[in-house]
Amino acid sequence: MRAMVLDAPRTPLRPADLPMPVPGPGQVLLKVKACGVCRTDLHVVDDEVHATRAPLVLGHQIVGERTDTGERVGVPWLGWTDGTCPYCARGQENLCVAARFTGKDLDGGYAEYCVADERFCLPLPDAIDDVHAAPLLCAALIGLRTLRAGGDAARVGIYGFGNAAHLICQVATWEGREVYAFTRPGDERTQAFAREQGAVWAGGTDERPDVELDSALIFAPAGELVPLALRAVRPGGVVVCGGIHMSDIPSFPYADLWEERSLRSVANLTRADGRELLALAPKVPLRAAVTTYALEDAQRALDDLRGGALEGAAVIVP
C-alpha cells in the first residue's frame, strides 16, 4: 500500500510502498478515506513529542471504512489504553500510564490502510462527509475538552486561531458565548477569519478588548501567551492551555494569578469527549474550513501548516 513515512525526527516524509497491515486481536483493518493534519504531527516531526517507533506513519485524525463491515468510523489520537490502571479506573483514560497514541506509538493515517483498536473507533454522523469529519477527530475534540475545562464562561478568549480554534469558536457561539480571538499582531487576515467563525472581537495578542474574559483558551504553542491571558481574565477566571506541547512559560508576577485565577492544562482526550463532540457536530452544525492534499503531498501539507499558510485545517485524501 502507499504511505508517507517519517524515518527519523527532523527529516522530510518520504513515500513508501508498505505491506498491507494485518489486524491483531481486538483490531480492525480500515481503508483510509481522509486524514487530518494536526500541529501535533509537527511536534512529532520536531521530536518535541517523542515517537516510539521508526519508520512511522503519522496521522491521528483518521476517517476510515472498516473492511469487514463497511462501517465508517473515526480514529483519534488516543489509540489504546490498558483499562486497568488507576487513571482508567477513575474515568481518566486520557492519562492512562500505558496509553498508546495514533501516529506516535501506532501507525496512523498518512496511508491507504491502517489498523486500529476497535474500542477506539468512533462512529461518525452521516451528515458530515469524510473530508470535513477528519478535523473533528482531534482539533475539535481537544478544543471541546479545552472549552469545557474553562467552565461555564460567558466570555471566552481564544489565543491562536487555527485548526482547533476555528471549530471550537463555532461551538462556543452556538452555545451562546461571546468569543474574543487573539492572533499574531497585525494578522488581519486571520482576524477576519475569526469574525467569520463567530468571534465578536478579533485583534492581536498585543491588544485587549474592553471587557474582562471569564476564560481564556490557549491553542498556540507559545508559553509567553500565558501571562497575557492571565491578565485578560477576570478575578476567578480560568486560563486553559490546550496544546500537547508549549514553549516555556516565562515568569510572571503573582498578582497576575491572584484573586483566584486558575491556570491549567488539558491532556489528550477521552472517548466520552468524542461521543459528545460527534453528537454535537450536526446540531451546530460544525463546519471545518479545509484544504485538501493528495497523499504524496503530505509533506507540503505539513510545511503549509508550519508556515501559517492555512485557514482552518489541512486534510490528506489518499
Image: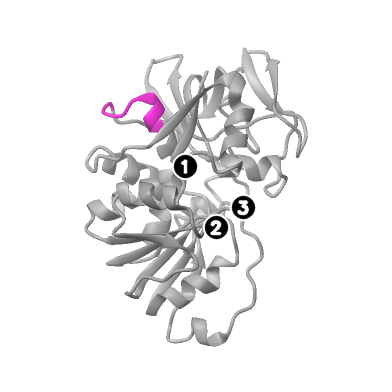
Q: CA distance from mark 2 to mark 3?
A: 9 Å
- Using the image, determine if residue 117 lies above or below residue 203: above
Q: Nearer the viewer, mark 3 or mark 1?
A: 1
Residue 138 falls left or right of residue 298 = left
Image location of residue 236, percent across then percent down: 38, 80
Q: Name the residue located 59 percent from the left edge and 67 percent from the top edge.
A: 224
Q: CA distance from mark 3 to mark 1?
A: 20 Å
- Residue 29 painted magenta: no
The residue tagged 2 is 86
Q: Nearer the viewer, mark 2 or mark 3?
A: 3
- Could you tell me the amino acid type at mark 2? Pro
The residue tagged 1 is 138
Residue 122 is drawn in which quadrant?
A: top left
The residue tagged 3 is 97
- Could you tell me the amino acid type at mark 1? Cys
- Using the image, determine if residue 62 lies above or below residue 41: above
Query: Is residue 239 among the parts visible in the rendering?
Result: yes
- Residue 129 painted magenta: yes
Q: CA distance from mark 2 to mark 1?
A: 25 Å
Work out whether mark 2 precedes mark 3 in sequence or the reverse, and give the earlier one: 2
Q: Which residues are magenta?
A: 126-133
Per the image, label 3 sits on a secondary structure element best described as loop
- Using the image, determine if residue 18 lies above or below residue 267: above
